[in-house]
């Protein structure tokens, strides 16, 4: 979550089956979890299934949660696993290829060197730009997209993103850099065309 | 077509530390090296500026406090047998 002051929940109350406390937890995190699932799956019904399964799983496994990670990290981990399982169930032929789609030796050299950073705020934040950003995110391979969503969209730290995905911080940073470079390339190509049209 | 970009070893070094630099998480000595390189390499300056803006746009395009849609929340609370606790957001 991008919230600077995360809400506090009593682990003991949750373990004791306190429904009021669990309802508070659901209320606080249903937004971020739904958004994460929707970003990962691009399908509202699937995102809703992931949302429901995440909190059902949390309810079932709260006794196993030791409190070493934050509640948000724990819930993000459950949701990410649910989303990945659903993704692979629906597209088993894609899952393996997706894992190796982004080889370590991929050339990261930027191709588009166009300075669009000083464009007016209204243009940078237009609906059209947001749509382009969405397309660029959707085009990322799953391994990069999930890291990018957790870190840059949901605002988790590098360490938290690693905890959610079971990755080392170095791996998170490598994937994040690749994801950001791809998104930057996509936006640069998009703005380059716009700047050409204007001139 | 993309503009041609001549790439030196210094450019490669900048690229590998780019994310950390943009996040302000790079050690000071490396920061200084990068800033020295940026003052001499226009292409890398453009890459850094547009990368910073890319990350900014992602943050600015998302509302971190946006709740799940009302009907989705309502069905979630029902699914978890928490109907008594469901309230419209906002």
Image (cartoon, coloured by chain):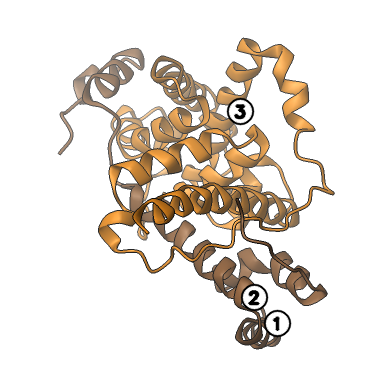
For the residues beneath circles 1 and 2, the answer to whether they share a chain is yes
Q: Position of residue B26 (x, y in %)?
A: 64, 75
Task: Identify the residue shown where x is 73% and y is 54%.
Answer: A108
Residue A133 left/right relative to B39: left
User: Quick check: B24 above or below B74?
Assistant: below
Residue A81 badge: 3
Residue pictured at 60% horizontal, 19% vertical: A87
- Report whether B28 appears left or right of A45: right
The residue labelled by disc 1 is B30
Identify the image quadrant of residue A86.
Answer: top right
Chain identifier, colour brown:
B
Question: Is there one chain holding both mark 3 and mark 2?
Answer: no
Tell me the SS state at disc 2.
Answer: loop
Residue at mark 1 to residue at mark 3: CA–CA distance: 36 Å
Provide the chain ID for the residue under circle 1: B
Tell me the colour chain A is drawn in.
orange
Residue B10 pos. (x, y %): 77, 77
Residue A125 in picture, x, y percent from top left:
31, 52
Secondary-structure class at tag 1: helix
Q: Could you say which quadrant of the image residue B20 lies in?
A: bottom right
Q: Are marks 1 and 2 in contact (CB under 8 Å)?
A: yes
The spot of residue A164 in percent (x, y) is 61, 42
Q: Which residue is mark 2?
A: B26
């Amino acid at each position: 979550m991008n919230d600077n002051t995360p809400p506090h929940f009593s682990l003991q109350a949750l373990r004791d089956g306190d429904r009021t406390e669990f309802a508070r937890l659901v209320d606080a995190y249903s937004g971020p979890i739904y958004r994460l699932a929707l970003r990962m799956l691009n399908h509202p019904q699937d995102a809703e299934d992931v949302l429901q399964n995440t909190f059902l799983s949390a309810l079932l496994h709260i006794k196993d949660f030791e409190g070493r990670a934050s509640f948000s990290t724990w819930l993000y981990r459950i949701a990410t696993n649910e989303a990945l399982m659903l993704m692979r169930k629906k597209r088993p032929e894609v899952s393996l290829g997706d894992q190796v789609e982004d080889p370590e030796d991929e050339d990261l050299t930027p191709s588009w060197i166009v300075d669009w950073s000083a464009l007016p705020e209204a243009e940078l934040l237009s609906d059209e730009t947001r749509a382009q950003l969405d397309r660029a995110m959707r085009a990322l391979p799953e391994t990069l997209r999930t890291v990018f969503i957790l870190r840059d969209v949901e605002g988790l730290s590098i360490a938290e993103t690693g905890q959610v995905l079971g990755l080392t911080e170095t791996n998170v940073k490598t994937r994040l850099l690749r994801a950001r470079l791809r998104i930057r390339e996509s936006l640069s190509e998009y703005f380059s065309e716009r700047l050409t049209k204007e001139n | 077509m993309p503009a041609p970009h001549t790439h030196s070893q210094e450019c490669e070094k900048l690229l590998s530390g780019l994310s950390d630099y943009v996040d302000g998480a790079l050690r000071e000595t490396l920061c200084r090296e990068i800033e020295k390189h940026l003052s001499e390499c226009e292409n890398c300056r453009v890459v850094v500026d547009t990368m910073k803006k890319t990350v900014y746009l992602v943050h600015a395009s998302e509302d971190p406090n946006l709740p799940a849609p009302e009907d989705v929340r309502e069905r979630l609370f029902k699914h978890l047998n928490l109907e008594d606790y469901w309230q419209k957001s906002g």
